[in-house]
Image: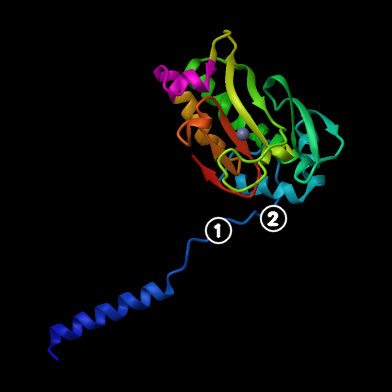
Amino acid sequence: MGNRMRHVLALVFLMMLSSCTARPPELPTAPSGPFSLSDPLTRSTAVRLAALSRDPGLCRALLWEVRERFTEVPNSRAGPYCGFTQAVEVTGTPIPYTRNAKVTCPVAAALHVWQKEVVIPAARRHFGREVAAINHYGTYSCRLRNSSRGKVPSEHASANAIDIAGFRLSDDRNVTVLQGWNGDRDERAFLREVHQGACHTFQLVLGPDADAAHANHFHFDMGEWVACQ
Ligand SMILES: [Zn+2]
């Protein structure tokens, strides 16, 4: 065996060794330190918000701490897969909604961080305006997932989701997902920024690029599936 061949074999061996020792990227774990909804957005925010689904007491305490305007909603069960636990009815988190939103506590917490850290700064930057109100198409709805072939309950069936239709700015301008996603430059940029920003607070985020069913709204939920489309 010539020297050249030995070098090639050694290289192949090293490559095999390195591929054997390679590890998949570490999944983020929720840090154990204190957490507040007032904290700035970080890489661990989504994980910490998702963990609230397992800790209803902490979730409520975090909403109280930021003086969220909410009322408790009694647990409800409707049929084999519908109903909700640890739901709250919010009037604004902190931006007011055009109508109240009944959502699980983790959705309310994620909405709070998303609005404070993403929506408000993006509106100031792109429009020089505040957001006066957020329009949503609904939260709780006893139904199966739109896209599923099987009978998989939607996160809406447990009030663990919200469909955001648009934003009313302080000058009464309406920025809707339907018109603005492919609208003027400012609206396109604003909507893409708030859509992408939601991926740092919610588990599943779907918008107009996901499928035709989401042409007119952003779907955000705190279920187990994680995606940003
Ligand atoms: Zn939805």
In-front residue for pair 214/44: 214
Residue 32 badge: 2
Q: Which amino acid does label 2 sit on?
A: Ser
In-front residue for pair 195/43: 195
Give how far across and how far down residue 75 sits, in percent: 85, 39
- Which residue sits at x=68%, y=27%? 138
Task: Report the span colored magenta.
Answer: 175-188
Q: Dot 1 surroundings within 10 Å: few (below 14), some, or many (20 or more)?
A: few
Q: Is residue 187 magenta?
A: yes
Query: Which residue is labeled 1 in the image?
Result: 27
Q: Are marks 1 and 2 in contact (CB under 8 Å)?
A: no
Per the image, label 2 sits on a secondary structure element best described as: loop
Give how far across and how far down residue 228 sits, in percent: 51, 41
Above-or-below relation of 217 to 129: below
Front position among marks 1 and 2: 1
Which of the 4 image quadrants contains residue 100?
top right
Above-or-below relation of 206 to 97: below
Q: Is residue 182 magenta?
A: yes
Give how far across and how far down residue 83 sits, in percent: 79, 40
**Direction top: furthest residue:** 171
Ligand 1 found in image quarter:
top right
- Which residue sits at x=79%, y=29%? 89
Q: What residue type is labelled 1?
A: Leu
Spatial separation of the CA atoms under disc 1 and disc 2: 15 Å
- Which residue sits at x=57%, y=44%? 148
Q: Dot 2 surroundings within 10 Å: few (below 14), some, or many (20 or more)?
A: few
Above-or-below relation of 19 to 154: below
Q: How many marks?
A: 2
Per the image, label 1 sits on a secondary structure element best described as: loop
Which of the 4 image quadrants contains residue 28?
bottom right
In-front residue for pair 103/149: 149
